[in-house]
Image (cartoon, rainbow, N blue to C red):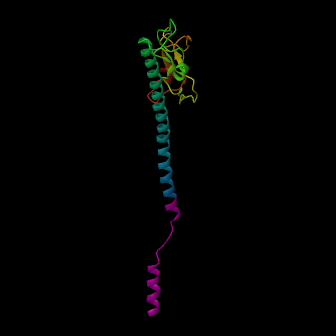
Amino acid sequence: MRCHRLRFRNRNILPQSGLTLLELIIASAILLILASAALPVFKFTVIRAKEYELRRDLREMRNAINLYKDAADMNLVRVKVGSEGYPPDLETLVKGVPFSGDLTKKRRFLRHIPIDPMTGRAEWGLRGVQDDPDSTSWNGENVFDVYSKSQGTALDGTKYSDW
């Protein structure tokens, strides 16, 4: 009789381990559903980050153009006649220009020309003062505005080139 009790107790002490096949299939299905729901969210997060970077780069370059224009209006920078006080190109903003008539001092308005996050190149569309506001060709004389050359559409439905 004693032997019988020990066997019964030992059987209850040992827990069952492992998962049944059904439990494994259900857990895998739940993980698959959660992973497939997270993928589009991650994709939009990456696109949103690129859009933020594009807006920041455009704002930085436009601010540099405005600073150059302000310096030209105050006669701190020599400008070409007919340029309306705008820089001849983006490289001028990076290389710098003699400032306040002192040829030894150069004022730089940009550290570098940023890379367009949508195209992956440091090529930007430029517009001059004489160009139409929606022109896609640059007159080559001065830089009044900068835009992305990407033909893609943003998450809000607008074209990147219209920003």
Res 1 seen here: no
Q: Is residue 17 visible?
A: yes
Instruction: Return the residue nearer the eye: 25 or 68.
Output: 68
Q: Residue at x 46, y 75 (%)?
A: 15
Residue 77 highlighted magenta (yes or no): no
Q: At x 53% / y 23%, what residue is drawn?
A: 94
Q: x, y (%) of residue 96?
A: 52, 21
Q: Is residue 20 above or below residue 98?
A: below
Secondary structure character of the magenta stretch overall = helix
Vertical comparison of 86 with 45: above or below: above
For the residue pair 161 and 115, the one nearer the viewer reads as: 115
Which residues are the magenta region? 1-24
Q: Is residue 21 above or below residue 82?
A: below
Q: Quarter of the image containing the N terminus?
A: bottom left
Q: Residue furthest top?
A: 82
Kindly identify the residue that appears in the image at 45 percent across and 84 percent down: 8
Q: Nearer the viewer, residue 97 or 6?
A: 97
Total of numbered circles in the picture?
A: 0
Front residue of 136 and 110: 110
Residue 101 place in picture, x, y as percent: 48, 14
Residue 3 is inside the magenta segment: yes
Rendered location of residue 36, percent (x, y): 50, 46
Q: Position of residue 27 (x, y in %)?
A: 49, 57
The residue sitting at 51% across, 56% down in the picture is: 28
